[in-house]
Image: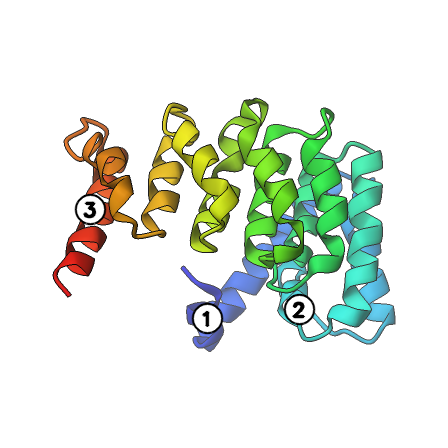
C-alpha cells in the first residue's frame, strides 16, 4: 500500500506509525550501534519534526541543501563500517532526479569490488532516478562490463530512453547476455528504428514471457510508425 493512501486515511496512518515505532524499537535493540538514530538526531537538531524514520524521506527533495550533506556523511560512515542495510537506507536520500552531485561517489561505489550486490542494485536504481547526462561515458562502460550482471539493468534502460547512439552496438551485443537481454530489447525499442526489426523478431515467439513481451512491444512501435 502506498504512503499516499496511508497519509490520506488518519486511522490507517496512526496504526501504521504505531506499528512502525514498534518495529524500529526492535531493530534498534537488536542493533545498538545503528547509525540511523544519530542521523535522525541531527535532523531534529536542524529543526525537522517527525515520528518515525520513514517520514524523514518526505523532506526530500525540498530540503535537499540541508539534508543531503548529512545523508552523505552517514552513507559513507555506514560503508566504512560495512553496515550494508544502513548504507542502503541512506541511499534512499539520493533517489531523486537531478541529484547529480552524488553521482561520482555512487559510480565509485558501484564499481568497487567491496560493494555487495544488493547495494550495487540500489546504486543503479539511484543513478536511473537521478538521470544525469553528464556521465554517459561511465554508464556505457558499466553496461559493457559483464561482471556487474543484473545490476546493469536500469542503466541499460536509461541509455535506451535517452537514445544514446554510442549505446547501440553495446545494446545489440547485450542481446546475447541473458542477465540483461530483456532490458537490452526494451532499450533498443526506444530508438524505433526499422533496421532493428530482426533483433525483435528473433524473440517475438520466445518461451521467455519477458523477452517475448518486450520484443512484441518494440515490433508494434515499428508497425505503428510504418502505418503513419
The residue drawn where x is 78% and y is 65% is 67
Q: Nearer the viewer, mark 3 or mark 2?
A: 3
Q: Quadrant of residue 129?
A: bottom right
The residue drawn where x is 41% and y is 70% is 5
**Mark 1 surroundings: few (<14), some (14-19) or many (≥20) residues within 10 A:** few
Quadrant where the N terminus is found in the figure: bottom left
**Which residue is label 1 attached to?**
4
Question: Mark 3 and mark 1 in contact (Cβ < 8 Å)?
Answer: no
Q: Earlier in the sequence, mark 1 or mark 3?
A: 1
Taking the image as shown, residue 50 lies to the left or right of residue 166, namely right
Q: Earlier in the sequence, mark 2 or mark 1?
A: 1
**Which residue is label 3 attached to?**
219
Depth check, front residue: 209 or 44: 209
Relative height, residue 139 to residue 96 (above, below): above
SS class, disc 1? helix
Q: Quadrant of residue 161?
A: bottom left
**Which residue is label 2 attached to?**
60
Amino acid at each position: 500500500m502506498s504512503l499516499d493512501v496511508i497519509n490520506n486515511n488518519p486511522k490507517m496512518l496512526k496504526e501504521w506509525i504505531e506499528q512502525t515505532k514498534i518495529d524500529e524499537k526492535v531493530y534498534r535493540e537488536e542493533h545498538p550501534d545503528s547509525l540511523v538514530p544519530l542521523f535522525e538526531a541531527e535532523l531534529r537538531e536542524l529543526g525537522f519534526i517527525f515520528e518515525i524514520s520513514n517520514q524523514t524521506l518526505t523532506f526530500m527533495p525540498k530540503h535537499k541543501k540541508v539534508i543531503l550533506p548529512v545523508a552523505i556523511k552517514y552513507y559513507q560512515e555506514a560503508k566504512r563500517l560495512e553496515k550494508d542495510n544502513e548504507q542502503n537506507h541512506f541511499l534512499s536520500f539520493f533517489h531523486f532526479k537531478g541529484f547529480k552531485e552524488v553521482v561520482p561517489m555512487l559510480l565509485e561505489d558501484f564499481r568497487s569490488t567491496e560493494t555487495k550486490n544488493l547495494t550495487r542494485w540500489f546504486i543503479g536504481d539511484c543513478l536511473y532516478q537521478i538521470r544525469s547526462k553528464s556521465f554517459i561515458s561511465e554508464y556505457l562502460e558499466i553496461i559493457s562490463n559483464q561482471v556487474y550482471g543484473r545490476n546493469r539493468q536500469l542503466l541499460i534502460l536509461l541509455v535506451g530512453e535517452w537514445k544514446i547512439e554510442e549505446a547501440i552496438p553495446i545494446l545489440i551485443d547485450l542481446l546475447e547476455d541473458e542477465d540483461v537481454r530483456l532490458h537490452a530489447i526494451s532499450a533498443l525499442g526506444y530508438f524505433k528504428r526499422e533496421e532493428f526489426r530482426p533483433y525483435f523478431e528473433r524473440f517475438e515467439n520466445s518461451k521467455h514471457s519477458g523477452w517475448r513481451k518486450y520484443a512484441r512491444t518494440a515490433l508494434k512501435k515499428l508497425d505503428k510508425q510504418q502505418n503513419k
